[in-house]
Amino acid sequence: MKIWDEWIEVAKKGIFTIQTCKECLNKQFYPRNFCLNCNGKLLSLEPLEKDKAKIFSFTQIYRSPNKELFNPPYIIALIEVEDSVKFVCQLDLNLEEVHIGKVVNFTNYSEEGIIYFR
């Protein structure tokens, strides 16, 4: 999927993007070939502004499905952007630093496809 490849290339440069429909201004993640709101095809990847993402929910994982990729314990979070877009990522934080509503920012997209926020 070309749009996903574009997203990955930008993320590898340290920029997290949200797809925006130019027809109805709907924002969505992950990138698709159409708008989930209006089925429009005029879409663009817009950089997520600093301090616009917050923790909506989280959990700490103690048993890893793959210890080479995920060293337990680690934190997985549901991140919310602009009260509409939500996605899952791994947090690069200690549990004591994590709370619902905490503002976080994109830090990395790993070769293994893991999205990190801090």
Image (cartoon, grey):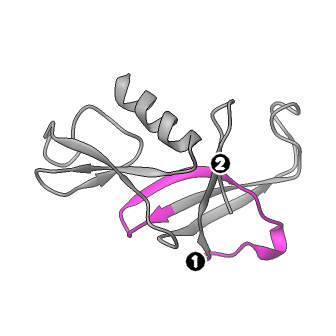
Which residues make up the magenta segment?
A: 80-102
Residue at horizontal 88 percent and vertical 43 percent from the top: 71
**Quadrant of the rendered image containing residue 92:** bottom right
The residue carrying mark 1 is 101
Q: Residues within 10 Å of mark 1 (few under 14, many from 20)?
A: few
Q: Is residue 78 left or right of residue 72?
A: left
| Picture disc at residue 108 | 2
Q: Residues within 10 Å of mark 2 (few under 14, many from 20)?
A: many
**Type of residue at label 2?**
Asn
Q: Residue at x 32, y 35 (%)?
A: 32
Q: Mark 2 and mark 1: span between their CA atoms? A: 21 Å
| Dot 1: element | loop
User: Would you place residue 18 above or below residue 7 in this image?
Assistant: below
x then y, percent, for residue 88 = 57, 50
Q: Residue at x 58, y 40 (%)?
A: 12
Q: Is residue 84 magenta?
A: yes
Q: How far from the left and from the top, in percent, is residue 65?
A: 80, 33
Q: Nearer the viewer, residue 112 or 55?
A: 112
